[in-house]
Each structure stands twice: as C-alpha cells, then as structure tokens.
C-alpha cells in the first residue's frame, strides 16, 4: 500500500514536471512556420469545410480542430464575439490553442507509463515516464499547433490497443483497436502505415504459432476493422464528397496518377473515403517525392539537396538526427536496455510483448531513413520515440532489475539526461546533445526545423533592442555585428552568405536560431581583396 502511494506521487510529480516544462518554455516562443496553416484548417473544420482546396498545405488534418477549442469555448461563454477579428487575433488564438496539444501530450505520457507498467511493472512504468518527461524533442513539439504530436500519440495508442486485441481477442478489444486505428487516420497521414505494421506483426506471430489471434482468425475481424476505419474517417472529414469515383480526382503525384490510369473500369466505382482525405494523401506524396513544399531544400552535414525533379533527400538523415538531437543519456539507456534484454531474454516474452514495440520502430526506421525524402526535421521521426521509451522500462523489470545490478549507472545517466535537457531551457526545438559542445556550430550538422522554425522572433527583438546597431540579414558583405538566421545561412540564401560561413565563425547566438558574427572593417577589406584576386585569376 505504501509503495502504491509512493508510485502514485512520483507519477503525478513527473506529469507535473512535464507540464511545467511545456508551459514555461513556450511563454515567449513566436508562432512557427506551420502553425498558422494548421490553425486555419482547424477553423475550417469548425465551419464545416474540410475541403482540400483551402487546406493551405498538404498535411493538415481534422485533429487541428482540437486546437481551436479554447477560442470556441470563449465564444460559447460569451467572452469574445463570434466574429472575433480572427485575422488580427490569429497569434493570440494559436498561443491558446497550443495548450490543447500539451494536454494531448500528457495523455500520451499516461499511455507510455501504462504500457511499460503492464509489461515490466510499476517501477518500469515510472522510469519510462521519466524518459518521456525529459525527452527534449517531445517537449519541443508538445507545445505547437501541428499534427506531429497528435500523429505520434495516436500511433502509440493504436498499437497499444492492437496489442491488447491480439493477446485477448474478442469484440470488445477489437472495438477499442479498430476505433483507435480509425481515429489515428485523422491525426496524421503517417498513421496510414499502421495497417501494414499490424499485418507484419500478425504474420510474424503466426509464423511462431503463438498468437491467440492468428492471421486466419483475424480475417473474421478484418471487415469490422475496415468498416470502423472508413466510418471514422468519413465522420472526421464530415463526409465531404464521399463516394467520389477515382476518375473524378485530379492527382498531382506520379503514384496516384499511375493508379488512376491503370484502374480500368474501377475508376468509376465510388470510393468509400472523403475527397479531401485521398486528395490530401496525394498532395503529401507529391510534395514528399519532389520537395515542392520545401522552398529551401534539405540540408545535412554541409550538403544541400535542392527541391525539384532530381530531389532525393539524404539516406540516413534521421540516423544522424537521432545521434545528435537525442540526449546521450537516453541513447545509452536504449543501448543498455537492448543489451539487458539480450542477456535476460528468457525472462521476457518477445512474441507476446516486445514485438509490438520492435516492428513499429523497425518499420519507421527503414521507411524514414531510406524511402522518405521530405527530411525537414527530426519531428517526423518522433513516432518511434514512445516505443523506445516504453522499451527502456525493461531495465526495471521485476526479477531482472536485481540481476542487472546497475542502479548506479541508471541513476547517473538519468541525472545526466536531466542536466542536459534543462541546460537548453526554454529552447527545445534547437536542442542538440553534447556531441555538439559549441552550440553555435549545430547548424553545420542540421538546419531546417531542427534548429529554426520561426520560434525565436521575440528573442531576436530583445537582442536588437540590446544591440540597435546590429545588421539583420544583410544583402551583401558588410562590417559590424551581423545577425542571420540558421536557415538563411544553410538553405534559403546559402550562396549569399558564403562569405560569412566560409571565412568566419559565429561569436554569439540568439535562441540558437540566429547566429551572430562580428566583422571588422579590416576583415571585410580582406574578403573583398581575396574575391577581387580570385576574379582576376579566373580571367
């Protein structure tokens, strides 16, 4: 009884810490590049318009309506006009909407705890929750009006309930699994991959002849799953132009155009999905293949891949991102958990438990690193994090903990994680671990949404008040205190600023998103003389 009380207190303390880290770190963060589009689409959903033509970008989903709840509640309570001067107050509404994402992230925290507790015991549940609480990339995107955290959360929850269904069977468990699978499709298109992931898990378990629900028996539930999924997707998109035949779509991506051209007589059969759902999926695929939504291309380790017909991305992009942007302590805990699992594998039941963690991680690891091209930040790879957090709880499994006998190591690594994460407070989008000791050098490794996503505007204003003579984004080489945002240096205007990046190192930063250079008159004269000499030599 005493232990249960202690566990309950620790549970709520960790949730409280996570909440405080989110709330206080978002206080001065300006609106990021994607939040306006997501919020506007949430408004469209409340107005009964999920149409694709005004969805602003490819990845907007019905879950965005949740972030509009504070504004709608204010209207219902008469605290603001129904008209609400929306364009003028957009920034305020987005800031209040961010708290809904935070609440949803707390729900995901609960499921991480619950899953680890069911697998490995109460202490393991708290340990996994601790890792989630101090995961800087989770914190960074728990505070934003985007689909990233919603997609991560619903993917995790859907796999959790699928595991319960596969282990126990029955219509009740099937209902919970089918509903969460369907709801996940309204959060982010990444959740579409849950269907093959579930199939792979069933096939793997079937080969071992271990599951309570085999592939054959699962087929009896297949129709139920499909009906529930289609119903939820249609409800989520308000049945907008459902039953539109394939022939009526105007696809952009090569993949969907190919499907449409080879469908034959099937082109005229009404589809059971809403028009904006499939149309949005086409836009996602088109932008991902061509990089059309990446005005600045993709940057990695000094290399730049420009969007266009030959756009390819970088194989292994998310491996590099994981190595540099996940706390070293958490990476070591994952490795220790893997080693501990191998040594004590007889004390675990892989085909009943860990397969539901491993298959999603492997699937998304392979897909994002070797097939996905739209590599604009580790945020897309966040979907594997909760599964890894749960798996780390295996270090504390009852009956294995004492044999592992490394409590001091776990405590030391945990303290290291806390210190590393708190050292970046309140800036978690640009978090890099200690492999990048000089934090001003992080943009030499990654840029994009891994460092600067528009969140540092307030800090830039404060810096310019402190240094009013500073020159922001100069059009040409000049002397003085120069401030340039990371993405202008590495992506948007990289050629314009080669004179900076090739000849000088930053002396300061602004919220890690802007780099500050101090250029003397003599330095500028030297650069111009070298450029003139180079031109003369070429002639």
Image: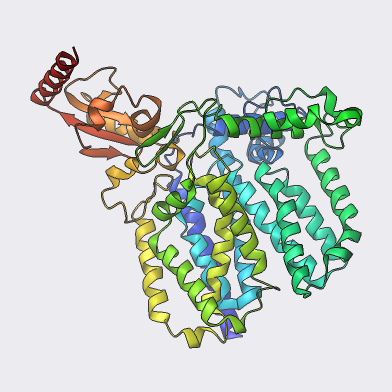
Query: Which residue is more in the foreground, 275 or 310?
Result: 310
Residue sitting at 43 percent across and 42 percent down? 450
Which residue reaches farthest top?
539
Q: Could you tell whether 425 is left or right of 42 in the image?
A: left
Please state, as top left, top right, bottom left or bottom right, where the C terminus lies in the image: top left
Q: Position of residue 92 (x, y in %)?
A: 53, 32
Task: Quadrant for residue 435, please give it.
Answer: bottom left
Residue 511 showing in the rendered view: no
Number of callouts: 0
Considering only vertical position in the picture, is 177 above or below 29?
Answer: below
Query: Which residue is more in the foreground, 489 or 457?
Result: 489
Query: Which residue is more in the foreground, 363 or 6?
Result: 363
Residue 218 showing in the rendered view: yes
Q: Position of residue 65 (x, y in %)?
A: 69, 37
Residue sitting at 84 percent across and 44 percent down? 230
Considering only vertical position in the picture, is 457 above or below 187?
Answer: above
Task: Quadrant for residue 534, please give it.
Answer: top left
Task: Quadrant for residue 510, please give it.
Answer: top left
């Amino acid at each position: 009884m005493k232990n249960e009380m202690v566990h309950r207190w620790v549970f709520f303390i960790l949730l409280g810490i996570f909440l405080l880290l989110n709330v206080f770190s978002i206080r001065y963060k300006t609106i990021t590049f994607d939040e306006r589009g997501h919020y506007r689409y949430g408004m469209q959903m409340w107005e009964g318009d999920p149409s694709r033509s005004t969805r602003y970008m490819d990845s907007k989903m019905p879950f965005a309506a949740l972030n509009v709840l504070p504004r709608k509640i204010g209207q219902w309570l008469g605290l603001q006009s129904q008209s609400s001067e929306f364009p003028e107050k957009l920034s305020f509404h987005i800031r209040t909407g961010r708290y809904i994402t935070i609440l949803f992230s707390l729900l995901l925290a609960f499921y991480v705890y619950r899953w680890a507790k069911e697998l490995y015991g109460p202490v393991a549940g708290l340990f996994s929750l601790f890792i989630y609480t101090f995961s800087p990339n989770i914190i960074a995107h728990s505070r934003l009006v985007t689909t990233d955290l919603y997609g991560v959360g619903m993917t995790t929850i859907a796999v959790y309930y699928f595991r319960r269904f596969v282990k126990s069977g029955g219509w009740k468990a099937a209902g919970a699994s089918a509903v969460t699978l369907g709801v996940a499709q309204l959060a982010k298109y990444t959740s579409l991959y849950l269907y093959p992931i579930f199939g792979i898990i069933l096939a793997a378990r079937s080969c071992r002849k271990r599951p309570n629900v085999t592939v054959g028996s699962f087929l009896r539930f297949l129709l139920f799953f499909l009906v529930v999924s289609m119903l939820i997707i249609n409800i989520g998109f308000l049945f907008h132009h459902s039953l539109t035949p394939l022939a009526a779509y105007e696809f952009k991506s090569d993949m969907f155009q190919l499907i449409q051209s080879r469908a034959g007589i099937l082109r005229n059969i009404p589809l059971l999905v809403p028009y904006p759902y499939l149309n949005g999926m086409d836009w996602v695929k088109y932008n991902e293949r061509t990089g059309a939504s990446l005005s600045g291309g993709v940057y990695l380790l000094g290399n730049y891949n420009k969007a266009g017909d030959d756009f390819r991305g970088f194989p292994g992009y998310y491996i590099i991102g994981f190595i540099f942007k996940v706390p070293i302590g958490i990476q070591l805990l994952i490795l220790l958990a893997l080693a501990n699992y191998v040594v004590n594998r007889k004390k675990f039941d892989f085909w009943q438990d860990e397969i539901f963690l491993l298959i999603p991680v492997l699937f998304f690891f392979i897909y994002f690193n070797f097939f996905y091209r739209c590599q604009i930040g580790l945020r897309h790879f966040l979907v594997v994090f909760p599964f890894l957090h749960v798996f780390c709880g295996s270090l504390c499994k009852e009956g294995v903990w004492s044999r592992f006998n490394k409590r001091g190591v776990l405590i030391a690594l945990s303290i290291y994680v806390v210190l590393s994460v708190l050292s970046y407070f309140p800036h978690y989008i640009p978090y890099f671990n200690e492999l990048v000791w000089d934090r001003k050098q992080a943009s030499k490794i990654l840029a994009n949404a891994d460092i600067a996503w528009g969140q540092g505007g307030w800090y830039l204003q404060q810096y310019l008040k402190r240094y009013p003579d500073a020159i922001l984004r100069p059009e040409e080489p000049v002397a003085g205190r120069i401030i340039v945002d990371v993405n202008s240096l590495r992506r948007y205007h990289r050629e314009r600023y080669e004179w900076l990046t090739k000849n000088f190192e930053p002396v300061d930063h602004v919220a890690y998103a802007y780099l500050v250079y101090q250029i003397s008159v003599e330095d500028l004269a030297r650069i111009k003389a070298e450029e003139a000499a180079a031109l003369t030599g070429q002639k």
